[in-house]
Amino acid sequence: MKNTMNIKTKKAASVIAGITLLAGSLTFSLTAFGAENVKAQLSPDFTIVVDGEEKTFYSADGNEVHPIVYNGTTYLPLRAIGEIMGKNVNWDESTLTVTLSGNRGESAVTGTPDKNAVSKSINAQIRDDFTIIVDGETQKFTDANGNRVYPMLYNGSTYLPLRAVGEVMGKNVAWDSKTETVTLGAKTGSLVTDADSFNSTENIVQNTIISVDEAKNIALNHAGLNSSSVKFVKANTDWDDGRRIYEIEFYTNDYKEYDYEIDAYSGDIVSFDYDAENYSYTAPSSNSGSYIGEDKAKSIALKQVNGASESNIAKIKLDYDDGMAEYEVKIIYNSMEYEFEIDASNGNIISLDKESVYD
């Protein structure tokens, strides 16, 4: 289990930089000794909605630019942030400072949509030596759990964390996993928001964590069991990619093991695993005609993933594990990946793993 990232880079004694400023767009090439090189994900499938209006962003030369996801946080380029906030952007090379201020006079740049863009891994830099000032106030961005997040540099442009910028603007930021949409809107009531954890939830997250008993009950209800029929061996909070989770592990009386990761704020199941530790079975005949068949195995798996269809099946394979014939079935649906092992002789689910494709 990974702990939340804590970036501590040594400030460079000097920075060699070149800057290109085009029509108010902040872009520059930079070689720095204090930057941290990271792998991030370019995510053109994400939709950004601001105050009910879907937004598409372009560079100064009319090329469409896309969100980047790193460590569970969505980033947008500075030009897009300036448009969302309605502010002008300035870069001070001598102090490595970005300033957003005033009222943006120019209209949003238009261009040609990039219809061929695909999600892919990219190389970027996390820059804790950049200073961001909004209307005269220096900003220190944090994620939903209070952990520092820093500006990102990619392909000559500065990117800022969208959720944190939304907070500066006094807006809620919500994530809809079904449509892969980030929404910025007016705050209502006492709800707080985050779009730092891309799990399968569409609800705005409350600013308090659920209790360990609630987490246990969520796991038990999902497994179709009750507390009297299981023994808990683990029930504690932890951190995974900046997300606070409950790790819940228990055994049934017949030694079946269940492992769950549950979002500590929303109660959503992040991942789960089921294994029959001492699974008893009758060895099937070597004749594959005695097996349930691929169609039956696919049907069994699809019943466990509400809304998925056969087109979502990415893999179906007959294999053997410890002498047992089993079907391996993989389903990808709503940004989640499900992996099943199904007994080829009787159709029992031996194991099931679930995780976000972004993990």
Image (cartoon, helix red, strand yellow):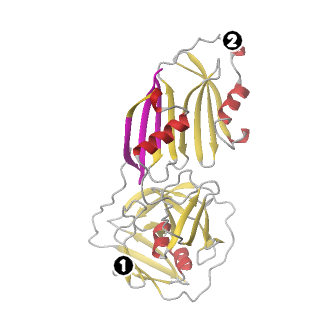
Instruction: Tell me which corner region of the image, top left, top right, bottom left or bottom right, holds residue 63.
Output: bottom right
Residue 338 location, x and y as percent?
Answer: 59, 38
Name the residue rendered at 53%, 51% in the picture.
199
Which of these two is toward me, 266 or 96?
Answer: 266
In three-dimensional space, the C-alpha distance between marks 1 and 2, rounded to whole angstroms, equals: 71 Å
Q: Amino acid at mark 1?
A: Thr
Q: Earlier in the sequence, mark 1 or mark 2?
A: 1
Instruction: Say if the magenta span includes residue 17.
Output: no
Residue 233 left/right relative to 114: left
The residue carrying mark 2 is: 287
Residue 144 occupies quadrant: bottom left
Residue range of the region highlighted in magenta in the rendering = 234-261
- Residue 155 visible in the displayed image: no
The secondary structure type at the circle numbered 2 is: loop
Rendered location of residue 206, percent (x, y): 47, 59
Name the residue located 52 percent from the left edge and 62 percent from the top edge.
Answer: 68
Q: Position of residue 110 (x, y in %)?
A: 66, 77
Q: Residue at x 50, y 71 (%)?
A: 166
Q: Secondary structure at mark 1?
A: strand
Determine whether 205 is above or below 325 in the image: below
Q: Quadrant of the N terminus?
A: top left
Q: Nearer the viewer, residue 204 or 27?
A: 204
Q: Which residue is mark 1?
A: 138
